[in-house]
């Protein structure tokens, strides 16, 4: 049984408690005290941690108020380290303090790397000494004052003082020394006086004090990774997809923390910039960094330890999970049942992201982010996999002769084109059996089959597009939809997308102004589209100055998004072939620009130099300079100024 008469003070180091106990009992030697306390005289008293706690607590007299966890949490430095260590490591450290073998303790704390050397001597705050004497009748060693890298008492903003009790001597000869004994010695000095960068030191001290006072549980590296990333992005120091803006980050870091300050707190930047500790902490957040580094990192991101550990788990570009299933045939339609994205890819240097969400019902959809509003959760940018439930629903609606195509599309939250596409995929009969039905969205709604929400549609836009479409129809009563679409592409696209019911009822076909086609003939549609592509390509080719003819440009002219969709094009072989013929390579357009410029020089009667011609033809960029064909064109074009009429290339010249 240990004769125990001591009550630990707030924030008192366990070493200090033992020292006061040893002094109270008047032990003649360290060994004698250790034999009684630890049961073995060879144990060296530890300053940062506690040892043999199970044995000590088991041997205390009845009625004592100590328990192992209270000693560890209230009187050792472990609460400073544990929030930055994985739970398993913290558990094993606590077990080591309970048991008798503490040989791996320093390694497990990450102290063996000596990233921040511990202060040589035990330290104290002179104002704390005065206050402790008033309150308790004696001074004691505070654990807060022994933290490596700390120079201020956060309670009094006073500089910490070094005693003449070195940690080395504690182990070798002195054993337990109380603060009162140390304070009797004449050789007391300030740790660093005066303190430069007071504010930076003070914030560190306050963060450490908070960790000791309130504690934080152990965390794995992902905890830090996600929060650091969110803060870095918020501060513009990382891109949204998590890539560090290295130069900006290093600039901000070195401006905030001067080298002298970092050296003083033991966090100097030794390695080359890309491998230095703040960059490693920002990019990997692996374990093994000293708590002081984490606290500095938080300080850089304008976050105190208290704010940091209270941060909720940051949300990604698609808001917090779980996410809704958007399959109208699913029992969980619009309910948050998808716990994690199936796949997410970043685009445009991390400014945009595409995600695939898949539900257990077999339905998977694609969405583009980041989200800017809550309702975006219920929009999709395309179906990735429809699944059996969805397919069955389309088939049922398709065969329902009382429902028209627009209503089917509305029910499935799809455009009419997409609905047709999926119907073709399922080999359903064309045209939609109910396509002449007048049952529209309102009727569906009455049946409890909710159509696509129209609340966000701008009524002014609707009015404008409806008027434009109606006027086009009135102006040319014989024109079919394809012709009207060419004349009013914007109104056509808008109405078909947002006002499909009205549009279906106000198309030439619906009003009987053109003979009704027997059904959608995909082969005929393919041929028609192929010819439209050729027309559009010609239109682009006629434009001056020449612009490259691309699939996107043709699609924009025709207002046909399917030209950009490989699966849709797979069903339109002639259109695909027409696109391949029409599309221009970089070389093609470069050559066209050369002849366009040449023609203008000829028209103005000027003879350009090679750089002048290159500039006029926009061939000055290195990528285009490298194009041999363009060079050849320039050679020939330049020759044309010396011997006009002999040039065969580019009939535009001979005609000018
Ligand atoms: Zn103090
Ligand atoms: Zn579902």
Image (cartoon, helix red, strand yellow):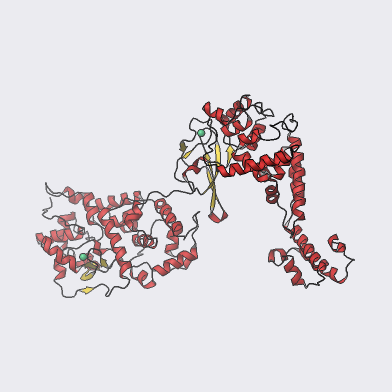
Q: Is residue 642 left or right of residue 375?
A: right
Q: Position of residue 353 (x, y in %)?
A: 54, 49
Residue at the outermost right position: 646
Q: Position of residue 644 (x, y in %)?
A: 88, 68
Q: Could one spot residue 14 in this view of the protein?
A: yes
Residue placed most toward the observer, 601 or 286: 601
In the rendered view, tell whether residue 173 sits above or below residue 588. Answer: below
Q: Give the residue at x 30% y 57%.
A: 80
Residue placed most toward the observer, 379 or 504: 504
Q: Is residue 556 left or right of residue 224?
A: right
Residue placed most toward the observer, 499 or 269: 499
Q: Give the residue at x 43% y 66%.
A: 252
Quadrant in the picture for residue 76? bottom left
Q: Give the residue at x 67% y 41%.
A: 469
Q: Position of residue 115 (x, y in %)?
A: 36, 64
Q: Is residue 428 left or right of residue 355?
A: right
Q: Position of residue 271 (x, y in %)?
A: 44, 68
- Looking at the figure, which quarter contains the C terminus? bottom right
Quadrant in the picture for residue 454? top right
Q: Is residue 184 left or right of residue 390?
A: left
Q: Could one spot residue 104 in this view of the protein?
A: no
How many numbered discs sit on the rendered protein?
0
């Amino acid at each position: 049984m240990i004769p125990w008469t001591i009550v630990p003070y707030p924030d008192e180091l366990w070493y200090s408690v033992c020292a006061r106990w040893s002094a109270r009992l008047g032990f003649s030697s360290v060994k004698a005290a250790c034999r009684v306390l630890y049961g073995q005289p060879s144990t060296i008293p530890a300053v940062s941690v506690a040892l043999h706690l199970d044995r000590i607590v088991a041997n205390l007299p009845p009625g004592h108020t100590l328990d192992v966890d209270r000693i560890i949490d209230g009187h050792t430095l472990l609460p400073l380290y544990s929030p930055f260590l994985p739970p398993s490591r913290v558990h094993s450290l606590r077990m080591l303090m309970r048991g008798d073998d503490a040989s791996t303790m320093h390694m497990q704390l990450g102290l063996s790397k000596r990233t921040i050397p511990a202060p040589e001597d035990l330290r104290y705050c002179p104002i704390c000494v005065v206050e402790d004497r008033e309150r308790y009748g004696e001074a004691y060693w505070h654990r807060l004052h022994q933290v490596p890298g700390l120079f201020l008492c956060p309670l009094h903003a006073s500089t910490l003082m070094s005693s003449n009790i070195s940690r080395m001597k504690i182990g070798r000869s002195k054993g337990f020394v109380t603060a009162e004994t140390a304070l009797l010695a004449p050789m007391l000095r300030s740790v660093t006086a005066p303190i430069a960068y007071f504010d930076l030191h003070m914030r560190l001290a306050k963060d450490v004090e908070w960790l000791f006072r309130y504690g934080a549980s152990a965390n794995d590296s992902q905890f830090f990774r996600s929060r650091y990333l969110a803060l870095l992005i918020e501060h513009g120091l990382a891109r949204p997809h998590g890539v560090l803006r290295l130069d900006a980050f290093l600039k901000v870091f070195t401006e905030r923390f001067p080298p002298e300050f970092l050296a003083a707190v033991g966090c100097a930047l030794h390695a080359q910039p890309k491998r230095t500790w703040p960059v490693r902490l920002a990019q990997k957040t692996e374990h093994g960094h000293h708590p002081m580094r984490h606290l500095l990192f938080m300080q850089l991101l304008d976050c105190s330890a208290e704010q940091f550990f209270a941060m909720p788990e940051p949300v990604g570009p698609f808001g917090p999970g779980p996410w809704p299933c958007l399959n109208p045939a699913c029992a969980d339609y619009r309910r948050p049942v998808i716990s994690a994205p199936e796949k997410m890819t970043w685009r445009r240097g991390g400014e945009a992201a595409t995600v695939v969400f898949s539900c257990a019902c077999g339905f998977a959809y694609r969405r583009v982010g980041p989200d800017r509003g809550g309702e975006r959760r219920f929009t999709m940018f395309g179906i990735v996999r429809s699944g059996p439930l969805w397919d069955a629903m389309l088939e049922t609606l398709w065969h329902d002769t009382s429902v028209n195509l627009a209503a089917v599309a509305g029910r499935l939250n799809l455009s009419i084109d997409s609905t047709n596409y999926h119907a073709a995929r399922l080999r359903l009969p064309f045209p939609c059996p109910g396509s002449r039905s007048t049952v529209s969205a309102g009727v569906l709604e009455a049946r409890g089959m909710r159509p696509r929400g129209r609340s966000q549609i701008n009524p002014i836009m609707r009015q404008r597009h409806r008027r434009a479409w109606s006027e086009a129809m009135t102006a040319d009563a014989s024109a079919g939809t394809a012709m009207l679409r060419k004349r009013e592409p914007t109104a056509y696209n808008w109405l078909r997308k947002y006002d499909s019911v009205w549009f279906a009822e106000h198309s030439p076909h619906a009003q009987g102004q053109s003979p009704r086609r027997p059904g959608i003939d995909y082969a005929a549609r393919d041929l028609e589209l192929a010819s439209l592509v050729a027309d559009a390509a010609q239109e682009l080719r006629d434009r001056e100055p020449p612009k490259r003819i691309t699939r996107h440009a043709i699609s924009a002219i025709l207002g046909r998004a399917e030209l950009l969709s490989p699966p849709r094009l797979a069903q339109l072989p002639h259109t695909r072939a027409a696109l391949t013929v029409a599309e221009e390579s970089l070389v093609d357009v470069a050559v066209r620009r050369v002849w366009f410029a040449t023609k203008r020089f000829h028209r103005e009667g000027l003879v350009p130099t090679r750089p002048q011609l290159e500039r006029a033809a926009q061939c000055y960029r290195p990528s285009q300079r490298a194009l041999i064909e363009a060079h050849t064109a320039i050679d020939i074009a330049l020759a044309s100024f010396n011997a006009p009429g002999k040039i065969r290339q580019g009939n535009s010249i001979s005609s000018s």
